[in-house]
Amino acid sequence: MRAEVKKTKNKEPVASGRIKKAYRRKRTAIIAAITLIYLVIVAAAAVIIDDRHIEITLLGDEDQLAEAGENYVDPGAEAYFTGNLFGRTKRPVEVRTESGVDTTALGDYVVKYSAEAFGRSAESYRRVHVRDTMPPVITLEHEKDYLASWLVGYKEEGFTAVDAFDGDLTDKVVRTETGDAVYYSVVDSSGNECAVERVIEYGISEPMIRLTGGEEVDVGAAFTFTDPGYEATDESGNDLTSYVQVTGEVIPWKVGSYELNYYIMNEQGETATARRTVNIVPQPMEPMVIPEEKTIYLTFDDGPGPYTGQLLDILARYGVKATFFVTGDDPDYNDLIGRAYREGHTIGVHTFSHDYYRIYSSDQAFFDDFLATEDLIYEQTGTYSRLFRFPGGSSNTVSRNYNYGIMSRLAKTFTDMGYVYFDWNVTSGDAGETSSTYRVIENVAAGCSENTVNVVLQHDIKGFSVDAVAQIINWGRNHGYTFKALDETSFTAHHEIAN
Ligand code: ZN
C-alpha cells in the first residue's frame, strides 16, 4: 500500500489529506475526553462544595400570644452555617432580628429573623398576637375600725380598678349595694371582667353631739340667724349630723337670750342631747361725731325720679355731697342710685314701696320691704347701706292706724342690728306745705341754725324743690356753712317716737 502510495507520487496530496483527517479525528477525541474529565471533576467539586447553607431555628413557638400591656420578650432564634467546603462544618452565625411588636396596641405582628455567611443567607418568621386576656383588678380599701351604721347605712370606704392594658378603670366600676354587701364589677375594653364583693359590717355605738362654738354664744342682732354648727357621730365615725333634731327658737333681730336643744337617737334607741344658749346682742355702734364747723346735711327722699339727674348735676357743679334715701318706686331711674353713689353721695334706705299701709302693717312686712331696697341698692352700687329713714319719719303717727307700737319696735330692732336711722330738724316744706321754689329756699334758710347740726329734708321727686338747691347752697356758703353727706357717725336728728 505504501508502494502504491509511492508510485502514485502524484497522488501524494491525496494521501497527505487522509493523514491529516485521521490526526484531526484523534485530536478531537482527546479534547472531548479532556473536556469530559474536566466536567466530571467540576461536577464532583460542585457537589462537594454546594452543600453550603444556613439554617435558622426559632426558639419557642412559631405562633406566640403576647399579653397586652406587658413587656414582650422575644425568645429569639439560632442560626448555623453548614457545608462541606472546608470539611463538613457547622458554625453559629449571628441572627438579625426585626421586630415591630408593640404590646400597647392590640394586633398581629411578624418578627423577622435573618442571617448571612459565606455568600449564603436565610430568613425565618414568627407571628406574635398581642391580646388582652387579663381581667382588670379591683382593690377595695378599708378604713380602720370602721363599722357601718344602721342609721346612715354604709359609707363607701373606697376602691380602685386597674387593668394592665386599659389603665385606671375606677370610673367604670359598677357598684351595687344591698343591705348586706356591696358588689363591684368592671369590664375592660377586651371584655375581660372582674367582680368582687364586700360584706358590710355594722356596728352599734352611742351617738355623740358636739357643738361648734360652745354651749353659749353671743351673736349680733341681724335679719337672720345661722347656727354656729354642730356635729353628731358615733364611735365608728359615722356622720349622724343630718339626724339631729333641733328645737327652740331664736329671733335673730330681737336682743335676748334663747335656748336651742339638739337631740339624736340611734337605731338602738340610745339618745344624745346638747343644749346651747344663744345671746342675741346689739351690734356695735359707731359713736356719733358732731362736726366742729357749721354743717348742713342736705337729704333727699323718695327718689330717684325725673329730677334726680338734674339735682346730681347741680350738686356736682357746686362740689356738694348730699344724702339720698331711696325707694324702688320708679324703676326707670334706678340707675341714678348708682350714679349718685359713684359721685360720692350717700345712699340710704327709705323702703321700696313707701306704702304706709303695707310697710307698717307688721315688723316682717317692713323687713321685707326694707330688704328689697337693700337689694336694689346693692344691685346699683355693689354695697349695702346701713343708713335709712322711715317713711314719714320715726315720729309718724300714721303707722298707728296699721300696727300699734311698730315704730318703737322697729327703731329699737334696727338700731340693735347696727342700722342708723335719720330724721331731720330742718324742713323745706316741699312735702305739701308749699310748691314754691322761693318758699323752699326761705324755709331752709330760716330753719338752719348755727347752734345745731342741720339735717334738711327735701324730696328730689319735686322739681320746684330741686330748683331751690343751687340757691340754698349759695345761701349756706355765704353764711359760713359746710355741706356734707351723712355717714354712720353723723348726727341723727331723731324725733320723738309717737307710736
Ligand atoms: Zn318719704
Image (cartoon, rainbow, N blue to C red):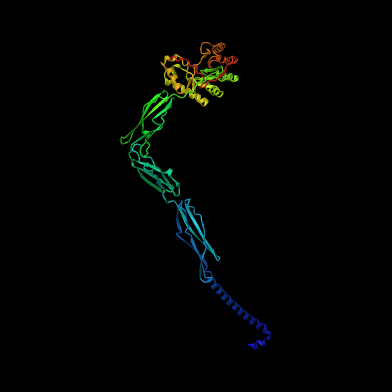
In this rendering, is residue 33 above or below 135? below
Residue 30 place in picture, x, y as percent: 59, 78
Residue 236 sits in quarter: top left
Q: Nearer the viewer, residue 366 or 259?
A: 259
**Looking at the rendering, in which quadrant would you find the C terminus?**
top left
In this rendering, is residue 193 above or below 436? below
Residue 276 place in picture, x, y as percent: 38, 29
Q: Nearer the viewer, residue 94 or 479?
A: 479
Residue sitting at the far front: 292
Q: Is residue 244 visible?
A: yes
Residue sitting at the far left: 269
Instruction: Please tell me how many numbered marks the rendered image carries.
Output: 0
Residue 69 place in picture, x, y as percent: 46, 51
In this rendering, is residue 457 above or below 244? above
Q: Nearer the viewer, residue 289 or 44?
A: 289
Q: Is residue 368 visible?
A: no
Residue sitting at the far bottom: 3
Residue sitting at the far right: 10
**Looking at the rendering, in which quadrant would you find the N terminus?**
bottom right
Residue 210 place in picture, x, y as percent: 38, 34
